[in-house]
Image (tube, rainbow, N blue to C red):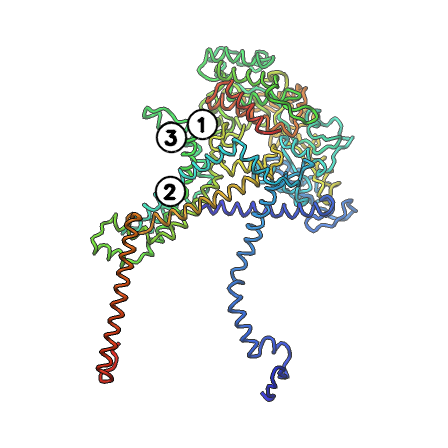
Amino acid sequence: MKHALRLRTAAAGATALTLAFALAACSGGSDGSETPNNDGQSNNSDNSSGEEITLRVGTFNEFGYKAAGLYDQYMEENPHIKIEEVLAAEAGEVMATVKSGLAAGSGLPDVQAIEGDWMPEFAQSASLFADLSDSSLDGRWPAYIVEPATVDGTLLGYATDTGPEAICYRQDLFEEAGLPTDRAEVAALLEGDWDRYFEVGKDFVAKSDKAWFDSAGANYQAMVKQVENAYENSDGTPMDLETNNTIKGLYEQIAKASVEDGLSAHFGQWGDDWFSAFQNGAFATMLCPAWMTPIIENSAAGVDGWNIADVFPGGGGNWGGSYLTVPAQGANIEEAKKLAAWLTAPEQTAKVFTEVGNFPSQIEAQQTPEVQDKVNPFFNDAPVGEIFANRAAAITVVPYVGPNFAAIHQTVQDALNRVDIEQSQSVDEAWQQAVADFKSLGL
Amino acid sequence: MTTVGSGSEVSTGHGWFYRTFRSAPARARWGRIDVKASPYLYVAPFFILFAVVGLFPLLYTGYLALHYWDILPTSPQQGDFVGTQNFLTELGQPKFWIALRNTFSIFLLSSVPQIMAATFIAAVLNANLRAKTFWRMSVLLPYVVAPVAVSLIFGKMFADRYGFFNAILEGIGLSPIAWHVEPLASHIAIASMVNFRWTGYNTLILLAAMQAINKDLYEAAIIDGAGRWRQFRSVTLPMIRPTMIFVIITSTIGGLQIFDEAVMFDSSRAGSSGGASGQFLTMTMYLRDLGWSGSVRNGFGRASAVAWMLFLLILVIGAINFLLTRTIASAGPKITREQRRTSRAAAKQAKQKVLRQQQSFRRNQLKGRDKQDASEGGQR
C-alpha cells in the first residue's frame, strides 16, 4: 500500500542525501561560496562586457514580474542579462527548498523571493545571504519593513509588497443593525483602540444575529504585532509566558470578546468553514491586509455589501509581505543585486500593483497615481490604493520578531483556537495549557 | 592445434585476448562467472539505488538522531554528540505521546476495516458475475483519484459548520459532530479518506490471489459438504495467506506513516498542525514540524530520533502482524494444546504403524521373490 508515501520517503531520502553530502562538503572546506557555478556559465562575477549572464529568479504564488513585462524590459535595457524565472508550485514548499539549498551551498536561484514571516529564521543564517545594503536606497522603505530584514547592519532582502491592514465590513449588515454604512462614517465610528472596536461589536451583535468578526486568532495576530517586544527581548532571549502580562492581557481581551461577548463567528482562518462563511454572511467585519481583498472578492462572489474603512484598531498594522534576497552562493551576486534592486524600485512595483494588485512596500510607489487612484468595484468602489497607503503610513511600531517568536506565538494561538474555534476549554484552562505548552518547548 | 600441451604453460600462438576470453578453458571459466555473478548484476540496480536513497538516509538519520542538529546551523552546539538525549527528550514530550496515540488510532481505524472490506469485496468479485471487468475496475476507481483531491472533497464533507455530513445529521435531527475537535471523530474522518482510497487497491491484490487458487480444492470441499462460508474459511483464507501477509504488512507501513490525509484535513493554518490540542497530529506530521518548522532548536536531531522510533515501531507492529496473520489464517478450527498433543501422538503412532507395515510388506515381498526366484521377475 501507499506507493505515494514510499515515493515520498524516497524523495525525502534523496533530499537528505544531497543535504548530507553538502554538509560534509561544507564542514570540509570553507563556506559554500567557493564553488560558483551557474548552469555552465563562466565564473567571473564582475561581468566584462559581451559576456552573457543568466540570472534565475525564484518566486512563488504571483509576484507579477512576468505579467508586468518587467523581465523583458530589464533584458532589453541590459542586453548581456538573460532572466529565467523559477516558479515554485506552492509557497509552503519554497521555505524547505530554500533551507535545503542554503544548507547544501548550491542550487538556489540568483535572486530568491521569500516571505516576510520566514525572515526571523533566515536572519539566523545571515551570512548565507549577500549583503544588499545600499545607501542609495535609503528611504525607499519604511523602518517596519527594513528592520526585520536587517541583521547587524546587513540587509538580507529588498521588500516587494506589504500588507497594511484596514477593516473590511459588510455595509448591508451594518445597515440592518442600525450602524452607519458610509466608509468615512464607519472609520470615524471605529477610530480608537481595540476596546473601541469590541464596544461597537457589542452594539452590533445586540441588534444582529451575525457575528462581529470572523476569528479570534486573526485579531490576536494583529494585536501582537502592535507590541514591540511581544514574546522576546530584543537580544532574542524568550520571555517567560507565565509572567508575560502584556500577552496575557491581550489574550484575555480577545478571548473574552470572542466568547463572553459573543463577537466571534468562531472560524479558523483558511479552514473550509471560513471560506464557506463568506457566502453564508456569518460575520460583519474582518481585519484585512491589502492582499486579503482578492480573497474576500473570490470567496464572497455575489455578495454586494463589502466595503473597506480607512481605520485600524490601535493605529496601524502590517500582515505579510515578501522580500527578494540574493543567496551568497550565487555566481553573479553583483548582477543579481542590481536586478533585485531594480525589480523592487517604485516604478516597477507600481506597475506590478496595476497588473496583479500586490500592494507596494515602497513609500514612493504608494504615492504614485497608479496606486492612489485605484478603486475596487467589488468593495463598493472603495479607493483601495489610497486607503492602504494611509494604513501603511499609520504603522508606527516595529515589532521584534526573533527566533522564538513563531513557537511561542503558536502556543497562544492554540489556546485561542481551543477557546474560540473548538470551544473545548475555558479562557483560563486554555491559558494554563498554553503556559504548559510553552514550558515543554524547553526554551 | 599443432603444438602439444607441455603441462602448465601452453603456447598457442594466440594473444592474451584469446587466452582470457576465447579459449575453451577461458570460456568455461567465464561461463561459470556468468552463471554465478550475472543474477547479482541484474538485481544490482535496485540495491544500489536502495543503498543510495534508502539505506544511506536511514543510517544517516540514525547518526543525526545521536547529535545536536539543525537544518541551518544556528547554535554552536551544532554537530555535538548527545547520545540518547534526543530520544529521551522526545519520550518526555506530551506531544510525542499524543502523536503516537493518534497514529495508532488512525492506523487501526483504517487498516482493520479496510482489509476486512477488501477481503469481502474480493470474495464477491471472485464469484461469477456479469461484466466482471467493469466491477473490478470500478473498485479501483477511488485509487486513481489524487490524494489531494480526495482530501479536498472529504474536507468539505467533514467540515464542522457547513459540512455535508453535519448537514445530514442535523437534517435527521441529530446533533452535529465536531469533526476537527473530537479526537476520535477526527480519526474516523481521516481513516475514511484512507479507506476510500486504498480498499479497492487491496481488493484487487486479494482478488488476484483468490483467482490463483486451484478450483479442485473447492470441488473437493463441495464434495465434503462444505458450504460457501466454510469454503471461504477453510480454502480461500488459508490459500491467500501469503498475499494477506503482504497486504497487511504494507498497510501497516502505510498506516503508521499516515501523513497526506491528516495534513489535508488540517485546513486551518493558524496555530499548531493537527488541531489546537493535537487531536489528529500524527507521528509524521510531528516529525515534519520538528525538523522543518524552524521554530524548534535541535530540530533535525529530534526529528531523526522520532523517525527512528517510528521505524522501530513499524518493525515491531509489522512482526506482530506477520505472526498474527500466520496463526489466524492457518487452516482449521482452533485446537487446544491437549488436543494437539494427543493428535501428534496419534500421528506418530500411525506413522510408526505404517512404517512397520511397510517393512513387513517388503520383507514378505523379498521372501516371495526368493521363492518365485527368476520365474516371473519383479513387478513394479
Mark closest to the chain's N terminus, 1 or 2: 2
Please state, as top left, top right, bottom left or bottom right, where the C terminus of chain B lies in the image: bottom left
Residue B318 appears left or right of A196: left
Q: Residue at x 36, y 40 (%)?
A: B113
- Provide the secondary structure element on which disc 1 rests: loop
Q: CA distance from mark 3 to mark 2?
A: 21 Å
Q: Nearer the viewer, mark 3 or mark 2?
A: 2
Mark closest to the chain's N terminus, 1 or 3: 3
Indicate the chain on which mark 3 is placed.
B
Relative height, residue B181 to residue A55 (above, below): above
Q: CA distance from mark 1 to mark 2?
A: 24 Å
Relative height, residue A414 to residue A45 (above, below): above
Which residue is identified by label 1? B181
Q: Residue at x 56, y 40 (%)?
A: B305
Whether residue A383 is visible, yes or no, is no
Three-letter amino acid code of the residue under disc 1: Val
Where, by quadrant of the figure, is residue A322 drawn?
Answer: top right
Three-letter amino acid code of the residue under disc 2: Gln
Which residue is identified by label 2? B114
Closest to the observer, B250 or B162: B250
Indicate the chain on which mark 2 is placed.
B
Which residue is identified by label 3? B165
Three-letter amino acid code of the residue under disc 3: Phe
